[in-house]
């Protein structure tokens, strides 16, 4: 009788090149994404050692982290950003690597253009010098971030040394309430297990809620697996996965569609597969989520409050909560609903796809942003931007008072001019609310796109379930 395997085990076994007791294994890497921030040193090391890129056709590059989201025809003012972008262009030309340059329709955030172009597909191993590479796991790909020295290793050998991870099944079941999005689900998961709850594991998300999600919603869930400490997040491929990828540009052409999709779906976890750890979350009573602190696990529902310090028994945790509240300018036992915001950022590799923008546009249509709020929308790719403009979403946002931008990582990590000022409070659809993440002294609250859109209009956090659509 054949051994029942989960998707991680299937992909690992297929890509295992060499393994010996007591040492990390060597696995083959199918696809390598690079960007302007973590690749320059790797290419330079290849140059100094007189080595080439082993399989240049397996590497794809784009600029996303510090590209300007304002007028692309204008010169880049930031000296470091300009140098990094020019360096990536030169490296890709020298080493014959495919580059989706910032002035092309194929460009955008690396974790968004991969699936858009069909470079991402089930059963593949994918790496990038960026922690949120886990996003690609929504397609049944084993995808994870790597360091700069590992970027060089993959460029030179198309392999990577890795310790095999343990597996963690997170089942999401129940009937998802109105107003509760994929972002709320993953924030609730992180709130339950903590930012170290999945350390040492590759997570597979299962259950009726996950199956009900479309691929863009699944991408949001897998994207934030890293915020739970996981090495990667995975969702077994199904018909929805195949439908999304059909006729994408970089889909393999050497097999019939029927044979290809059959192979992809075979990577799905076998019924009865065993995991090292399992958890179940029922979402029937879940409410829209909002972070109040400086890590994603410091989260509550929109109708919740900041913690009561006297109820926290662990002195180290109490100290951490007190520090987070001080940084965020909040008091204990303070309601989140009604808290005023200064900025709203709809974007990032977590929530800047078409479905995110469509839902947010429904919230703002017919309204005007609050007089005290500076709101911006940054599409995840130039393709998303173009599609949104063809549907007239840009007009809805601009008429409401939002700043409509070019694609890029933008305020998610503040490596370009899109940054918070000290003590500015932001409703953000990104993935991290660390101190200074969006700008020195900036205060970030993670929410879904619809929650962020409503906050921009109201000028404060509201329960989206009470919103009146025009």
Image (tube, rainbow, N blue to C red):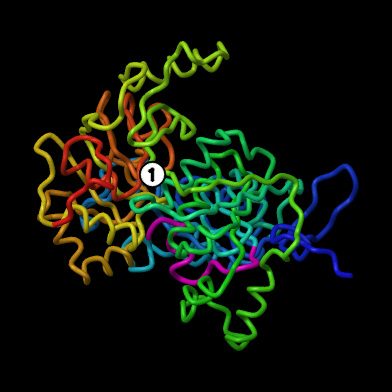
Residue 310 or 414: which is nearer the viewer?
Answer: 310
Q: Splitting the image into 4 quarters, where does residue 331 fall?
A: top left
Numbered range of the magenta stretch: 108-124
The answer to whether 22 is drawn above or below residue 16 in the figure is above
Determine which residue is flagged by label 1.
Answer: 430
- Percent of width and height locating residue 354: 33, 63
Q: In this image, 110 relative to 446: left or right?
A: right
User: Number of callouts in the render?
Assistant: 1
Residue 370 or 349: which is nearer the viewer?
Answer: 370
Q: Splitting the image into 4 quarters, where does residue 425 fall?
A: top left
Q: Which residue is drawn at 55% across and 11% down?
A: 315
- Label 1 CA crowd tier, 10 Å (few <14, some 14–19, many 20+): many
Disc 1 element? loop
Q: Which residue is drawn at 51% across and 75% down?
A: 250
Verify whether residue 154 appears in magenta.
no
The answer to whether 304 is drawn above or below residue 266 in the figure is above
Residue 356 or 134: which is nearer the viewer?
Answer: 356
- Percent of width and height locating residue 8: 70, 57
Residue 182 or 232: which is nearer the viewer?
Answer: 182
């Amino acid at each position: 009788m054949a051994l029942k395997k989960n998707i991680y085990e299937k992909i690992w076994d297929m890509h295992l090149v060499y393994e010996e007791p007591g040492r990390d294994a060597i696995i083959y890497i199918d696809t390598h994404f690079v960007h302007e921030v973590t690749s320059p040193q790797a290419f330079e090391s290849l140059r100094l050692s007189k080595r080439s890129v082993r399989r240049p056709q397996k590497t794809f590059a784009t600029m996303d982290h510090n590209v300007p989201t304002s007028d692309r025809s204008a010169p880049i003012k930031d000296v470091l950003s300009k140098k990094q972008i020019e360096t990536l262009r030169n490296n890709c030309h020298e080493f014959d690597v495919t580059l989706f340059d910032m002035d092309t329709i194929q460009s955008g955030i690396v974790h968004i253009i991969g699936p858009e172009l069909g470079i991402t597909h089930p059963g593949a191993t994918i790496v990038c010098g960026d922690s949120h590479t886990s996003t690609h796991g929504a397609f049944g790909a084993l995808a994870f971030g790597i360091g700069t020295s590992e970027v060089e290793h993959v460029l030179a050998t198309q392999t990577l040394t890795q310790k095999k991870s343990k597996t963690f099944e997170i089942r999401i079941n129940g009937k998802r309430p109105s107003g509760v999005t994929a972002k709320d689900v993953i924030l609730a998961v992180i709130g339950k297990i903590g930012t170290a709850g999945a350390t040492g594991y590759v997570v597979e998300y299962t259950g009726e809620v996950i199956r009900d999600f479309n691929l863009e919603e699944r991408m949001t869930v897998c994207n934030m697996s890293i915020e739970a400490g996981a090495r990667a997040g995975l969702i077994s491929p199904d018909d929805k996965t195949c439908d999304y990828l059909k006729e994408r540009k970089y889909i393999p052409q050497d097999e019939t569609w029927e044979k290809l999709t059959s192979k992809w779906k075979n990577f799905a976890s076998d019924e009865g597969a065993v995991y090292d750890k399992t958890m179940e979350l029922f979402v029937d009573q879940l409410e829209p989520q909002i972070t109040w602190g400086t890590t994603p696990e410091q989260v509550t529902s929109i109708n919740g409050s900041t913690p009561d310090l006297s109820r926290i028994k662990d002195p180290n945790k109490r100290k951490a909560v007190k520090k987070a509240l001080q940084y965020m300018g909040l008091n204990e036992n303070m309601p989140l609903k009604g808290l005023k915001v200064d900025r709203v950022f709809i974007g990032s590799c977590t929530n800047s796809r078409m479905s995110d923008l469509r839902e947010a546009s429904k919230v703002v249509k017919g309204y005007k942003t609050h007089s005290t709020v500076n709101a911006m929308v940054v599409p995840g790719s130039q393709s998303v931007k173009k599609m949104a403009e063809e549907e007239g979403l840009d007009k809805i946002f601009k008429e409401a008072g939002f700043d409509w931008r070019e694609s890029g990582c933008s305020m998610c990590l503040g490596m370009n001019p899109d940054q918070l000022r000290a003590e500015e409070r932001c409703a953000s659809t990104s993935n991290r609310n660390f101190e200074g993440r969006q700008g020195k002294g900036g205060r970030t609250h993670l929410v879904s796109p619809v929650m962020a859109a409503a906050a921009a209009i109201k000028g404060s956090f509201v329960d989206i379930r009470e919103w009146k659509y025009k």
